[in-house]
Amino acid sequence: MSAAAIALWAFLGGIAGSVLLAITPGKAFETILPVLILGSTALFAFSNRLVRADRAGQGPERSAGSLPKVAAIFFAGVYGGYFNGGLGVLLLAMLSLIGESDLRSINGAKNLASLVLTTIAVGIYGFAGQVAWNLAMPMMVGSITGGYIGGLVARYLPVRFLRCFVVLTGLVLALVFGLRAWH
């Protein structure tokens, strides 16, 4: 899938997710959040097996069609517009499931989709007066810096280690948010 297509579908999904968040009651959001994070973590953890099972017996020329790819990126965009936490894990999972195989390239596509859909979501929330800019600006600087440094570091780490780190991070996030919401 091209970078332009990823950006477009992430953008449209980000709009839909932002609108969905605006109409969702706060308690419902807190309750569903750990499930969303855990689901995206499980999807990423088992994405290699799911792709292999999906392709089994269908020949090496088979690739995911356009509609599944669009749906995967759009869904990730909705998720990111609705809640950005754990978005990286979900994007990695979706990109893996649609047939992308190099984790380092997937990371670049993930960063592009995240940038686009987060920008549109922040724009929508900002326009609606729902952003605490004094908190958002330092977070933005930290996110950009962390994404850049993370991309540099990822080049030198074994893929297996990166996959384990992503899964562990997702599990910890799901546990923390689950304990907050359900206790």
Image (spheres, helix red, strand yellow):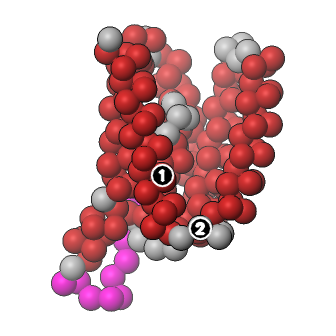
Q: How far across and how far down the image is residue 53, in percent? A: 22, 71
Q: How far across and how far down the image is residue 156, in percent? A: 65, 70
Tell me which residue sits at (40%, 11%) in the image. Answer: 27
**Mark 1 burial class by Cα count in 10 Å: few <14, some 14-19, many 20+:** some
Q: Quadrant of the C terminus?
A: top left
Label 2–label 1 contact, CB within 8 A: no
Q: How far across and how far down the image is residue 176, in percent? A: 42, 26
**Residue 3 falls in image quadrant:** bottom right
Tell me which residue sits at (58%, 55%) in the image. Answer: 110
Front-most of 24 and 110?
Answer: 110
Marker disc for residue 57: none
| Residue 71 visible in the displayed image | no
Three-letter code for the amino acid on which mark 2 is drawn: Leu
| Residue 18 visible in the displayed image | yes
Q: Give whichever of discs 2 and 1 has the lower sequence position.
A: 2
Magenta stretch? 57-71
Q: What distance separates the C-alpha of mark 2 from that of mark 1?
A: 13 Å
Q: Is residue 27 magenta?
A: no
> Circle 1 is placed at which residue position?
166
The rendered magenta stretch, by its main secondary structure, is classed as: loop
Relative to 168, does residue 62 appear above or below in the rendering? below
Front-most of 129 and 168?
Answer: 168
**Mark 2 burial class by Cα count in 10 Å: few <14, some 14-19, many 20+:** few
**Residue 25 falls in image quadrant:** top left
Q: Residue furthest left?
A: 57
Tell me which residue sits at (41%, 50%) in the image. Answer: 167
> Circle 2 is placed at which residue position?
157
Left or right: where does residue 51 sit relative to residue 176?
A: left
Tell me which residue sits at (71%, 40%) in the image. Answer: 143
Three-letter code for the amino acid on which mark 1 is drawn: Val
Q: How far across and how far down the image is residue 57, in percent? A: 19, 84
